Image (cartoon, rainbow, N blue to C red):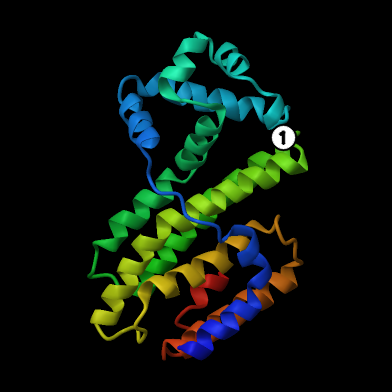
Amino acid sequence: MFFLLVLFQVMCYTELKLICWVYLSETEEEHLRKANTMADPRKYNLILDSLQKLLENKKLQTISASEIAQTAGIGKGSIYYYFPSKDAILEALVERNYEKPLTTAKTLSSQTDIPPFTRMAMIFQACRNASTEYLKSGEKSGVGAPEKALLHQKYMNHLISEFKPVLAEIIQQGINAGEIHFDKPEVLAEIVLIVLTVKMDNTIVPSSREEIEETIAGLVSLVEKGTDNPPGSLNFLMA
């Protein structure tokens, strides 16, 4: 296990420096925002849609709360009823775009009749679909490189922090069933998610297709050996 972790750190040091900062815990501010969401979901989502639309042609730092309100066709006061700041709107937009795969992951975590590796593959496919849709929308917009980097960073941080406990639970179930041989499910979940999200995103550390495939193949081989699982059991990471 120690050998596995050391090799992982060497392979992903650059990526880890960029995204492995402290995961955000749910604050009172977030509790309040979620409560306000229930007041009028239509208006809440209208605000998110408006920011997303503005980001297609403007830099994030130039967009004001007033402009978001104007685009949404609502009063500026409504913005602050649902969100305390522009950054909070951006965070909510990130969360919404990954709501579907996260719901899929949470549902699969309780379906113990499905093998753990199969459930992991289904979760990662849902993540890829969500990420692909986002990347396509970004290609059609005029958003500059700094805005894209910021949004991608927020996407990855949200993805890792939200999916880690769900994935760790599935891994723990596999350990209990004797299908996965590893005594630290949280560590394994984080290793897989960090490398996968960085390479799936491919904007923070741009790589060629061949380099991405080589990195993922190395990760697959490393984790399979470290968890004493047969070759090919983690091939879904390369799909």
Would residue 206 appear left or right of 115 to someone viewing this image?
Answer: right
From the viewer's perspective, is 146 left or right of 182?
right
On the question of residue 122 being in view, the answer is: yes
Q: Position of residue 11 (x, y in %)?
A: 64, 78
Q: Is residue 21 found left or right of 188 in the rendered image?
A: right
Whether residue 224 is situated above or below residue 37 in the rendered picture: below
Q: The disc labelled 1 sits on which kind of residue?
A: Ser
Whether residue 56 appears in this view of the structure is no
Q: Secondary structure at mark 1?
A: loop
Tell me where residue 90 appears, x and y as whole percent. 55, 34
- 203 vs 22, nearest the viewer: 22
Image location of residue 158, percent across then percent down: 49, 50
Q: Quadrant of residue 221?
A: bottom right
At label 1, counting other C-alpha atoms closer than 10 Å, the crowd grade (few under 14, some 14-19, many 20 or more) is some
Q: Residue at x 48, y 88 (%)?
A: 2
Q: Decide: is 110 above or below 24.
A: below
Q: Quadrant of the C terminus?
A: bottom right
In the drawing, does residue 158 fall left or right of residue 167? right
Where's the N terminus, which quadrant?
A: bottom left
Answer above or below: position of 194 versus 40.
below
Q: Is residue 1 above or below residue 74?
A: below
Residue 199 rendering spot, x and y as whole percentages: 63, 64
Residue at screen point 24% across, 80% down:
176
Please give the residue where the numbered disc 1 appears in the rendered image. Answer: 141
